Image (cartoon, rainbow, N blue to C red):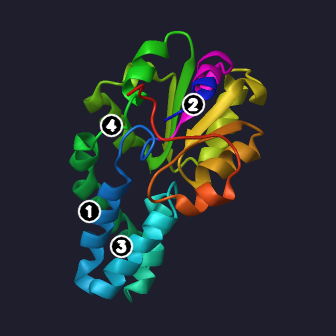
Amino acid sequence: MLEASLREKLVKEYNIIFWDFDGVIKESVAVKSVAFGQLFLQYGREVAGRVRQHHEAHGGVSRYEKIPIYLAWAGEAVTEDKVHDFCDKFSELVLQAVIDSDWVPGVREYLQANYARQCFILVTATPLEEIQQIVQSLQIAPYFKGIFGAPTSKTVAIRDALQRMNCSPEQALVVGDSETDLDAAKANNVAFLLRRTTLNRVLQEQYSGPMFDNLSDE
């Protein structure tokens, strides 16, 4: 649970909050791990297991970066057409599963209660068209002043949003669950709040800043 002092700071101090999606708004990291395993199971259980492990250890990295690596492990020629084909198949596997996955407790309620007085921006490695479809299905699109997805990197998305809104880094916070999120925050001199999950325990040990489990009072 987010400590009361941190919750108050999150509510009162920051004008703009950048939210990651998988593992921060929805419990969807494991959904994508299963999908990657299914996608590469045709190449054997060893390859599929290696793919799942890599995905879970590299949260926040776009599928466009991961799939070429996995194709090489599978012994496939890494061509643009092959990468796009696998990305399309992956999207088919995960889209509805992400929509149906559990909410991170308290996050939807926080977004709904505070979007009118704080600026929320969604920053994810999910392809832009796909994340737009997801947030529309979840009926949370109105909560966000901006939505960024792949191929735009999180670092660039945060930089561009701060510039466009004429907002100083001191006024902003990144809420994420991966090293990619942390690196994007650092690159823009923005504060970072880590959402603890079972898949980022190594990062929890390395990170000395604020963390939370959920935004629920229960």
Between disc 4 and disc 2, the foreground one is 2
Between disc 4 and disc 1, the foreground one is 4
Disc 1 marks which residue?
A: 89
Gap in Å between the C-alphas at discs 3 and 2? 46 Å
Q: Is residue 85 above or below residue 96?
A: below
Gap in Å between the C-alphas at discs 1 and 3? 11 Å
* Residue 32 horizontal/vertical position (percent): 33, 58
Local SS, label 3? helix
Q: Are marks 1 and 3 in contact (CB under 8 Å)?
A: no
* Disc with the residue nearer the chain's start (1 vs 2): 2
- Return the mark for residue 3: 2
Q: Decide: few, some or many residues near mark 1? Use Cα within 10 Å; few <14, some 14-19, many ≥20.
A: some
Between disc 4 and disc 3, the foreground one is 4
- Return the mark for residue 123: none
Gap in Å between the C-alphas at discs 4 and 3? 33 Å
Local SS, label 1? helix
Disc 4 marks which residue?
A: 103
* Disc with the residue nearer the chain's start (1 vs 3): 3
Left or right: 75 in relation to 206: left
Between disc 1 and disc 3, the foreground one is 1
Gap in Å between the C-alphas at discs 4 and 1? 24 Å
